[in-house]
Image (cartoon, rainbow, N blue to C red):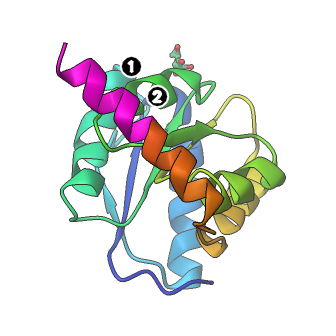
């Protein structure tokens, strides 16, 4: 497992709460530190509100990457990708979880608590955290993502 210099940011809505708790146990076993931005129980809540503080912690440098959970993983990934500087990927296969780090320099992994079980969810986390950005031609493409973001922000 890659040694992360900063804690991982974690957040979920009610649909991802149980998977978030399972992933936290897994991170505890690995010795990976995290900052849990909630939700802290299974009561209904809104995924954009849960995503925002965790994503802010990544872009402001407090946390290394974010692990985000909702029912499908889709809504919270959409919310995450609205935050400038976040490159979030919703994954349910380990190949994508690995390559979104290697090629897209993703800094947020999203998954659905109603889509993947705890075992696969933890394997997705491992694939994501163990992978490193390859740079080179991929850096050019990631830079283009930022150019889109900057152009939109200045409209
Ligand atoms: C909540 O019921 C559900 O809509 C949410 O967790 C998520 O799946 C949305 O994308």
Q: Is residue 152 above or below residue 122?
A: above
Residue 82 vs 110, above or below: the answer is: above
Residue drawn at (36%, 35%) of the image: 147
Residue that appears at 65% across and 51% down: 100
- Badge 2 residue CB within 8 Å of ligand 1: yes
Question: Taken as a whole, is the magenta stretch helix, strand or loop?
Answer: helix
Give the magenta range.
Answer: 145-155
Q: Residues within 10 Å of mark 2 (few under 14, many from 20)?
A: many
Which mark is drawn over residue 76? Answer: 2
Name the residue at 69% across, 28% down: 114
Q: Earlier in the sequence, mark 2 or mark 1?
A: 1
The part of the image, by quadrant, that contains residue 29 is bottom right
Q: Quadrant of residue 13?
A: top left
Q: Nearer the viewer, residue 9 or 140?
A: 140
- Disc 1 designates what residue? 44
Instruction: Mark 1 and ligand 1: say if the CB distance to the nearest ligand atom is below 8 Å.
Output: yes
CB within 8 Å, label 2 to label 1: no
SS for callout 1? loop
Identify whether 21 is placed above or below 126.
Answer: above
């Amino acid at each position: 497992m890659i040694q992360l210099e900063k804690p991982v940011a974690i957040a979920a809505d009610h649909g991802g709460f149980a998977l978030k708790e399972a992933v936290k146990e897994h991170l505890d076993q690995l010795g990976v530190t995290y900052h849990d931005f909630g939700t802290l129980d299974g009561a209904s809540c809104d995924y954009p509100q849960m995503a925002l503080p965790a994503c802010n912690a990544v872009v402001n440098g407090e946390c290394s990457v974010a692990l985000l959970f909702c029912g499908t993983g889709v809504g919270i990934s959409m919310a995450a990708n609205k935050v400038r500087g976040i490159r979030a990927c919703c994954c349910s296969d380990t190949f994508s979880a690995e390559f979104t780090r290697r090629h897209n320099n993703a800094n947020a992994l999203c998954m659905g608590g109603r889509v993947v079980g705890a075992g696969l969810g933890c394997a997705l986390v491992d694939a994501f955290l163990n992978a490193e950005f390859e740079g080179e031609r991929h850096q050019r493409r990631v830079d283009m993502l930022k150019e889109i973001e900057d152009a939109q922000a200045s409209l």
